[in-house]
Image (spheres, rainbow, N blue to C red):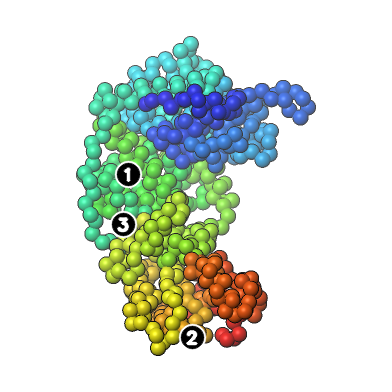
């Protein structure tokens, strides 16, 4: 492993806290060291308190911050004296510890300190780094792991047997450090957990981490357990969107709420799922206790979710009886699924959760394979895994958790999503917690949002062959379909019927009517599998109830789609699918309305542009966001008992009224 330290970069982070931020980010850049908020760092400083007295403080990484992007505000300032006194207590429950950590903050607005703050306080060195390095975990999680790490590090580290994070770990580390530490000691190895290094400078602690991790990597290489075989490329999969959607429905039932099921399609995931020993090596548990907390569930091999749920409930009852505590049971649903055909699938209540599980499990695969090559993968015992999963602090979070977002775990598809009303619909749905797939002919759709809960697909909706491929991609990305917003359409130049060309008529019908028919037909089987029932909203037009001269093709196409939706509402009600229409009018913040067209139409009516924009009963301007917010609400609980409705969003049109 190479050091990423750069003197020019480092100079941009002045002061000890600035240097702490810099090297924390260096650690966070390497996913083989820390993943998604894992690991923690600290620095010991002296500052004056409100009385002007010098006080020793520990600035330790706060909860909710990721090392890769952490800032100074992400470190929690704790009074060192209080932490050191806590370390001397004979016992302290984790809930008591959390309360004490919160109480020793010098800044009430700081994040909750890391649960390992006491351990950071008792270790020597101004700067302390802690990672869950893949290389070390690959070695500790084997039979004879302790002997191996002792061979690698000798007297440079103190070796701590596995104890779950918290007060007990800090106490044990303090005792063993006092007994084992010598003049060459620069760190701790926490078995099955991670590595600590410490020094009087940020650079020193960071480069010690790189040095010790390199020793572990070299040991694996020496024993031919570092370089992993390159997996074979994944062949083009057969269409499986209905199977995936059905699997998602089953998982959502076990979860008790809609779930995101992401089919990764990676070569490493497929190769691991196809191993003859996968049922044995994948079922032992996570690579580190930190990953138990983040993934919340052990993997599942195959697709028998009912069997997994039954086995997990038995596991919970057995471990809970041993623990002797009253616990809130977590949902008995897998977070990782390994299937020979689908490969690696990850599951989450949100797309972000599924993405975190994806990253963690890809690293877990590498760790398992290296440990297997070294002599045999060996995870923590089931009771230790359970104790972390049902940790008092995690239970407290579970009890305190608020309601999830309205569309958490649900998947929406929006057409014409690159601009205008479609783009606004994407934003409204994301705001409510949905994972959103946007379709558009404009390539800009792929860059509309850079976040795990959005996926843009370039698609010509009029292509009967392109549409199934787009739906297959969407389902493999998130697992199914719950919400469908039919927005894409064209508004041609005005022409009286006597002058309307057949080519233009057919073009408008192809885009505005035929494409929506195809999409409804292809999405119906997926919407039937929506855990909470499918929902469709069509962005219609004022021209449906009140057409205007010169817009025959547009008005007829929109009216036809409206009629199609009414028929679908009659046919699909038995499938728990509801369909509703919105009829906007004069939405000017779209690509259809250029400044020139807007000025021309205003002049036609003898109005100023501003007066033309509010030329309705309420004298108000209708925006894309107004339409999008209503579309999102019509997919939500307020309209749960409404189907085949037609709702205007036009400021009031006298011709419609």
**Tags 3 and 1 in contact by the CB under 8 Å rule?**
no
Callout 3: few (<14), some (14-19), or many (20+) C-alpha neighbours within 10 Å? few
Name the outermost residue toward the right: 51
Q: CA distance from mark 3 to mark 1?
A: 14 Å
Residue under the image location 58 percent in, 31 percent down = 60
**Tags 2 and 1 in contact by the CB under 8 Å rule?**
no
Q: Which SS class for mark 1?
A: loop
Q: Position of residue 496 (x, y in %)?
A: 44, 85
Q: CA distance from mark 2 to mark 3?
A: 59 Å
Q: Using the rendered view, name the quadrant where residue 538 is placed.
A: bottom left
Badge 2 or badge 3: first in the primary sequence: 3
**What quarter of the picture does the C terminus occupy?**
bottom right
Q: CA distance from mark 2 to mark 1?
A: 68 Å
Q: Position of residue 125 (x, y in %)?
A: 55, 19
**What quarter of the picture does the N terminus occupy?**
top left
Callout 2: few (<14), some (14-19), or many (20+) C-alpha neighbours within 10 Å? few
Residue under the image location 29 percent in, 41 percent down = 281
Instruction: Look at discs 2 and 1 and give the one toward the viewer.
Output: 2
Q: Is residue 181 visible?
A: yes
User: Residue at label 1?
Assistant: 283
User: Residue at label 3?
Assistant: 304
- Name the side, left or right, on which 26 lies relative to 142: right
Q: Using the rendered view, name the quadrant where residue 576 is placed.
A: bottom left
The one of 464 and 575 positioned closer to us in this rendering: 464
- Name the side, left or right, on which 461 lies relative to 11: left
User: Residue at label 2?
Assistant: 549
Q: Position of residue 503 (x, y in %)?
A: 33, 79
């Amino acid at each position: 492993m190479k050091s990423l330290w750069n003197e020019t970069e480092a100079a941009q982070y002045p002061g000890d806290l600035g240097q702490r931020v810099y090297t924390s980010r260096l650690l966070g850049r390497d996913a083989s060291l820390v993943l998604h908020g894992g690991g923690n760092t600290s620095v010991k400083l002296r500052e004056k308190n409100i009385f002007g007295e010098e006080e020793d403080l520990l600035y330790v990484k706060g909860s909710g911050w990721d090392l890769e992007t952490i800032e100074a505000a992400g470190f929690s300032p704790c009074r060192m004296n209080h932490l050191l006194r806590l370390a001397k207590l004979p016992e302290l429950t984790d809930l008591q510890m959390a309360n004490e950590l919160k109480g020793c903050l010098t800044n009430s607005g700081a994040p909750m300190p890391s649960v390992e703050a006491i351990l950071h306080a008792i270790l020597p060195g101004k700067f302390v780094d802690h990672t869950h390095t893949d290389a070390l975990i690959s070695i500790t999680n084997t039979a004879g792991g302790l002997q191996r790490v002792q061979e690698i590090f000798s007297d440079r580290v103190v070796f701590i047997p596995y104890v779950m994070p918290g007060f007990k770990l800090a106490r044990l580390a303090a005792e063993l450090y006092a007994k084992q530490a010598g003049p060459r000691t620069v760190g701790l190895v926490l078995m099955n957990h991670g590595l600590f290094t410490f020094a009087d400078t940020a650079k020193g602690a960071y480069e010690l981490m790189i040095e010790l991790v390199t020793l572990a990597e070299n040991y694996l290489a020496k024993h031919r357990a570092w370089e992993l075989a390159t997996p074979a490329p994944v062949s083009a999969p057969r269409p499986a969107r209905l199977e995936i959607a059905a699997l998602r429905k089953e998982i959502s039932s076990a979860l008790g709420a809609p779930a995101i099921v992401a089919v990764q399609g990676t070569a490493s995931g497929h190769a691991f799922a196809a191993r003859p020993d996968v049922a044995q090596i994948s079922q032992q548990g996570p690579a580190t206790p930190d990953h138990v907390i983040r993934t919340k569930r052990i993997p599942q091999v195959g697709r028998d979710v009912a069997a997994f749920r039954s086995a997990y409930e038995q596991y919970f009852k057995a471990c809970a009886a041993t623990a002797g505590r009253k616990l809130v049971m977590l949902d008995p649903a897998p977070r990782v699924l390994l299937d020979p055909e689908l490969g690696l699938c990850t599951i989450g209540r949100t797309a972000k959760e599924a993405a975190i599980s994806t990253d963690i499990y890809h690293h877990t695969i590498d760790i398992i394979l290296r440990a297997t090559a070294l002599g045999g993968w060996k995870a923590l015992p089931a009771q230790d895994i359970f104790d972390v999963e049902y940790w008092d602090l995690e239970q407290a979070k579970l009890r305190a958790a608020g309601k999830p977002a309205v569309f958490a775990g649900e998947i929406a598809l929006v057409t014409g999503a690159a601009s205008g009303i479609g783009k606004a619909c994407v934003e409204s749905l994301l705001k409510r917690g949905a994972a959103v797939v946007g379709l558009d002919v404009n390539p800009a759709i792929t860059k509309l949002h850079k976040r795990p809960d959005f996926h843009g697909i370039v698609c010509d909706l009029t292509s009967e062959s392109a549409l199934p491929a787009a739906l297959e991609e969407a389902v493999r990305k998130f697992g199914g379909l719950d919400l469908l917003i039919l927005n894409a359409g064209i508004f041609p130049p005005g022409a009286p019927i006597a002058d309307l060309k057949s080519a233009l008529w057919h073009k408008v019908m192809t885009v505005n009517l035929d494409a929506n028919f195809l999409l409804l037909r292809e999405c119906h089987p997926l919407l039937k599998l929506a855990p909470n029932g499918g929902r469709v909203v069509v962005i219609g037009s004022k021209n449906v109830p009140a057409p205007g001269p010169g817009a025959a093709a547009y008005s007829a196409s929109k009216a036809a789609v409206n009629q199609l939706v009414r028929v679908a509402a009659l046919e699909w009600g038995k499938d728990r699918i509801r369909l509703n229409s919105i009829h906007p009018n004069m939405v000017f913040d779209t690509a259809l309305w250029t400044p020139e067209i807007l000025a021309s139409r205003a002049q036609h009516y003898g109005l100023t542009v501003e007066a033309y924009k509010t030329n309705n009963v309420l004298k108000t301007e209708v925006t894309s966001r107004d339409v999008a917010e209503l579309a999102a609400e019509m997919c939500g609980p307020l309209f749960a008992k409404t189907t085949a409705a037609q709702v205007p969003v036009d400021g009031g049109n006298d011709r419609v009224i």
